[in-house]
Image (cartoon, rainbow, N blue to C red):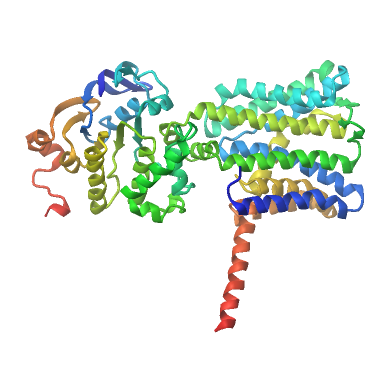
Amino acid sequence: MLRIKNINTFYGQVHAIKNISLHLAEGEIVTLIGANGAGKTTLLNSLSGIVPPKTGQIIFKESEINHLAPYKIVRLGVSQVPEGRQVFKPLSVEDNLELGAYLNYRITGGKTQAKQDMEMVYELFPILRQRRKQLAGTLSGGEQQMLAIGRALMAKPRLLLLDEPSMGLAPMIVQEILKVIANLSREKKTTILLVEQNARAALKIAHRGYVLETGRLILEGTADELLENKDVQRAYLGRDKKEIWER
Amino acid sequence: MIKEKRQILIFTLFALIVLLAPLFLKGSYFLNVLVFIGINTLLAVALNLLLGYAGQISLGHAAFFGLGAYVSGILTTRFPVDPWMALLAAALCAALLAFVIGFPILKLKGHYLAMATLGFGIIMYIFFNETVDLTGGPSGLSGIPNLRLGQLIFDNDRNNYYLVWVITLGVMLLSINLSQSRIGRALRAINDSEVAARVMGVNARILKVQIFTISAFVSAIAGSLYAHTMTFISPTSFGFNFSVELLTMIIIGGLGSMYGSFLGAAILTMLPEFLRVFRDFDIVIYGLMLILITMFMPKGLIGGLEALFKIVINKIKGGAQNVKR
């Protein structure tokens, strides 16, 4: 469904993504793990067109998208949940969700469709229904993350790019959100590219994973392989570390 | 159209007060001040679309106001152009200019955007001042004809009042409407986080240029109305000071609120008149008031009034409950 071939992305002089190639099959959950500054977020931003790659190719469902503007990429069915949630704080929950449907809103039937999709999101995250008139800035961190995911789903994506959904959240909430992500892939057949620092949690729900280090891909494999891998264990999982809920 | 009933009610009430006000006012001095307030409100609304909704600052909006005034003035004094056509031409001219400079300028953000628009404002001011053959230079341009509608000539304060306020109310209604539409949501999204708006599929670049263009269009209409009601214009009305005054109006009034724009415009237009009794100290008191308003009403006058209103309502409700007990 998605193929990335030898892309290089720069911030001015800084070479942030070095010759990365990877692929995603339809319906897969693939996770990108790596330390701070490894280039995970940059890779997602390159995919969504926010920081387009300088060289290389990104092919999404047979069409090359590396030169397209962000709104055209969204139209093709790629939605990003940006890092640190980035919900529109002065807007209500409902307005945030309607913005997610921005591109579909104007076409005929778009409004009714948006209403239906909003119901779908409320079913996924019932707490948002209770909060729907509230300003997004007054929600808790977990609720804001749910809203950010719901907002991305309003665009009816085929490919969902999730940037650190666990950032700054309590372990219980992280578990809940990851469960929803796993369900999305199982029930709605949404393909998901999940960027995470919490490597253990991400590998639990992913099918495959890639490991990034200073802009390079250093390892790839199925989720189980990576969980077993000695280097990955030492560097990203902590040899004997267990999350609170696993004890 | 406007969805909420409360919004419709507020606007209708506001429009009624504005339209009926002249019946209760004696003397043309007040009406004259109210005409100015109307023009300033129109300008504040235009700038509010840009800064209050989309979050893009402009320190050069007086230039669009001036461009509207001069295009209208030049076309009607030097060429036999009908004032209404001149008004339309002025607005289109400013919109075209905004559209062209909008693409490079609106790539900038924050302070840099402020500097670029400031530069634009100064360039336009110099242009009004120096092209003496065209604009009359520092001594101004006089003899601009009044607008007319059949037998009705807009040459006295009462007629001008209705001319200016009908247009201002119309633009206010459209602006309130815009804020509740899909585009309005997208603008507020850009205001909060441009990156997040872009990954939602909002074409931020085009949308910013569009709102800048609309804002310039409305500002130029205000400029044209100013030229035709005053019949005399000179560059000093369109300098940097006035750009800052416009900015002050919408910040004092309340960013993002069209009624706030009106309040800000009204206060900044009237205050210097009232403060004349303090003679040399007027500028000190003026500055002090602005500081106090920004300190104690961070959301502007309209936000402050809303908060006050809520407190009063709660007091009344609380009082009623106490009586029951």
Q: Is residue A140 left or right of residue B122?
A: left
Q: Percent x, y for residue A188?
A: 27, 38
Choose top left, top right, bottom left or bottom right for residue B244. top right
**Nearest the camera: B149 or A139?**
B149
Q: Is residue B39 left or right of residue B99?
A: right
Which image quadrant: the C terminus of chain A? bottom left
Which image quadrant: the N terminus of chain A? top left
Residue B12 drawn above or below residue B72: below
Q: How many marks?
A: 0
Taking the spot 45% from the left edge, 32% from the top edge, the residue there is A103
Residue B13 drawn above or below residue A4: below
The answer to whether residue B291 shows anywhere in this view is no
Q: Percent x, y for residue B200?
A: 42, 34
Choose top left, top right, bottom left or bottom right for residue B32. top right
Q: Is residue A238 left or right of residue B276?
A: left
**Nearest the camera: B283 or A169?**
A169
Q: Percent x, y for residue B10?
A: 67, 53
Taking the spot 16% from the left edge, 32% from the top edge, the residue there is A208
Taking the spot 28% from the left edge, 23% from the top edge, the residue there is A17
Taking the spot 23% from the left edge, 37% from the top edge, the residue there is A185
Q: Percent x, y for residue B227?
A: 83, 30
Residue B58 drawn above or below residue B289: above
**Nearest the camera: B135 or A83?**
A83
The answer to whether residue A77 shows anywhere in this view is yes
